[in-house]
Amino acid sequence: MEKLLDRFLRYVAVDTQSDENSESQPSTAKQLNLLKMLCEELKQMGVDASLDEFGYVMAKIPSNIDKAVPAVGFIAHVDTAPDASGKDVKPQIIPNYDGGAIDLKGVPGLQLKPEEFPELLHYKGQTLVTTDGTTLLGADDKAGVAEIMDAVQYIMAHPECKHGPVMIGFTPDEEIGRGVIKFDVQRFGADYAYTMDGGEVGELEFENFNAASAKIHVQGCNVHPGYAKGKMKNAILIGQEFQSMLPALARPEHTEGYEGFFHLISFKGSVEEADFAYIIRDHDRARFEARKEMMAKVAGFMNEKYGKGTVNLVVKDQYYNMREQVEPHYHIIDKAVKAMEMAGVKPKIQPIRGGTDGANLSFKGLPCPNLFAGGLNFHGKMEFVPVESMEKAAQVILNLVGLYAE
């Protein structure tokens, strides 16, 4: 049987970065390399698995008990975030971590330091997997993928392990908010499911942000600067003015817990025209709608000031807070809590300051809270994951399978 760490290292070696500017599904063909690999590995284990035209791997392990019990699903995404390169990942294995700074050897002088990331100290004595400083690691969410596959390997190798129907799903494009747009919940066949896409050990989440994207085009007017008085409209400066009219403290670097934000994620342009993009986030639906309305009012004001058509704003909703869909089925949270306690893990129920495929799946009729996969510092070169946390996550999956069989 393949060890969980070895499996994880195989998966992070495959470049699966998604692309928000692509219109295809999956957004990048290279994600299919890992999806095909997973589908084939499931078949080799004896699991009925398929990969469809949209890049969804779906698999089913039939029940081996006589009574009818709910079908439980486990889902993880294969893509890595566009924020940092996921190509040629060179993981570093740090056995028996001593609590000190870790050299990220791909970039001379770069270190993962507990002074900057104090959560490192929670994992003294454990085996850590880090990046080498040149790429992200991909624990988001290949740790989740590896944990699910490890649990499947155990179930298939131990027929004495009693279980009801177990459904497995792997998805593309979660990082760009399109992970389950075409996911067929009915074909998947689960009554309840869990995404293995959370952070540090113990995390259990059934609340997430309401989310939208906002793209803004500013049409300026470029005139020779020597003769520009009363004529020039500098698109760069108009864009900066737009930003200045949003609340200065409503930015990610100033918020936590249930606090929402406007996040300027890109800005490019010239005097003649400029384009910039935001993401809008809030746990509360009313405040979420108010944030979108604020951006519309700012755009309207700018057009009154500089002329109609100067600022064009396009806002698109991405996903909503899953709480309203999950809470009526709170027994699935209770089972997750028990499954963690059985594994010696202290549950930490908290809101996600982000989103998962589970949010959209919940609104598609599949209640789907999010469980820890073990990684930390996602989306960048400081990402790391403790091996022991991945092992605990795989055990929680097996515990849940057993609880649903009761």
Image (tube, grey):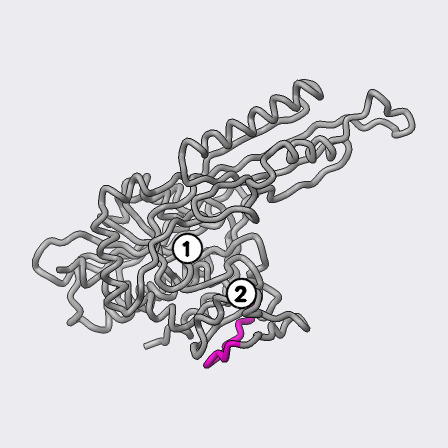
Q: Earlier in the sequence, mark 1 or mark 2?
A: 1
Q: Residue at x 10, y 53 (%)?
A: 68
The percent position of residue 360, horizontal first and vertical second, equals 37, 42
The percent position of residue 18, horizontal first and vertical second, equals 52, 51
Quadrant of the drawing holding the C terminus: bottom left
Quadrant of the drawing holding the N terminus: bottom left
- Checking the image for residue 77, the label placed there is 1
State which region is magenta. 88-99
Q: Any magenta on residue 390?
A: no
Q: Residue at x 57, y 49 (%)?
A: 253
| Residue type indicated by callout 2 | Phe
| Residue type indicated by callout 1 | His
In the foreground, 4 or 32:
4
Read off the residue under disc 2: 117
For residue 133, which quarter of the picture?
bottom right
Q: Residue at x 90, y 24 (%)?
A: 227
In the foreground, 392 or 49:
392
